[in-house]
Amino acid sequence: MSTKPWLSIRPHRLPLSFRIDRRTPIVLAALALMALLSLVFNVSQGDYPVPPLEVAKTILGMPGSSDYAFVVHTLRLPRALVALLVGMGLAVAGAILQGITRNPLAAPEIIGINSGASLVAVAMIVLLPGISTAWLPLAAFAGGLGAAIAIYLLAWNQGSSPIRLILVGIGLTALTTALTNLMVTFGEINAVSQALVWLTGSVYGRSWEHLWPLLSWLLVFLPLTLVLARDLDALHLGDSLAQGLGSRVEWTRSLLLLCAVALAGASVATAGTVGFVGLMAPHLARQLVGPSHAGLLPTAALMGACIVELADLVGRLLFAPIELPCGVITAVVGAPYFLWLLYRSGR
């Protein structure tokens, strides 16, 4: 039996190869099962309880499940699927940012991408209340992209230093948050109420109309990020070593930053600012499968899906019938986790 700690994967017909930890397939299978069970149990809970087995039968379209079809397919399943996808998008965006900045404390909500996306989305809600919600993902992407470009340009000094990216991002976060609060203060009361609920981070009331745009963004940028996993490994080693390995550092960093912006922007547009998922999920995944991004990225995606799904479930059950937004739950857990990471990195 081989004692090598790595597995090499070379897909046929594709000029790609991946090296992953031997634990990765088992971890991915366990996390996928956890995400699936969380989704089924989340769908089963509510004012009209549905047995988990009946939920599974209804989703699979098995005979005898028509009694619960409306509750499952129309009212609950889209919300649960949105929670999974939002967790995936935020987690992978966080893993990308931690890789390109070489900083374990980097995350979309910390370096300004989420706040830029939130600013434009809130402006759209407050200033254009009659516009379709289908435009929110594009608006949030534009805001996140604008924030990322501003961070990149302001941090440029004969190259984009990872430390400057983080420092400029923190400053830009403060500015965009202040502008968001200004619009909330002076906006029309009904639009402001909608914006405030959205800012807390929630998948309440999400339907198939919200799911399909988010899914389309993830289907494009998640595979692209996985293709760039080896380049992300090289960047994580440092710019000089990455150049020595043949990587086009600035081009690769820009493309990865675009992927992070797209994933975070689409997730924020769909569910609001669900905080700390992009910080926690990559760290937890790294402890399970190591630092290689070929295994880390899919593991972080499933870990983020589990976190948001479980946060939504806890928010629904903790003070039922009152629902807490999943963003409140992730913040309650994520803020102490962030402080612990800060303390550990300081030591």
Image: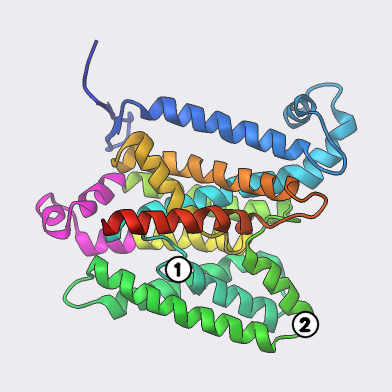
Q: Nearer the viewer, mark 2 or mark 1?
A: 2
State whether the magenta stretch is mostly helix, strand or loop. Answer: helix
Q: Position of residue 174 (x, y in %)?
A: 46, 79
Can you tell which mark lies on residue 113? 1
SS at badge 2? helix
Left or right: 265 in relation to 36: left
> Which segment did they paint magenta?
229-255
The one of 121 and 328 positioned closer to us in this rendering: 328
The disc, 2 or 1, on the residue closer to the chain's N-terminal end is 1
For mark 2, what is the residue? 189
| Mark 1: amino acid | Ile
In the depicted structure, whether residue 34 falls above or below residue 213: above
Report the residue at 31% width, 45% height from top. 229
Residue 200 appears anywhere in the view: yes
Specify the farthest residue to the right: 67
Q: Position of residue 225 (x, y in %)?
A: 38, 49
The one of 281 and 329 positioned closer to us in this rendering: 329
Residue 276 appears anywhere in the view: no
Which of the 4 image quarters holds residue 297? top left
Q: Position of residue 88 (x, y in %)?
A: 51, 47
Report the residue at 63% width, 68% height from top. 199
Separation of residues labelled 2 and 1 (CA atoms): 27 Å
How many residues crowd mark 1 within 10 Å: few (<14), some (14–19), many (20+)? many
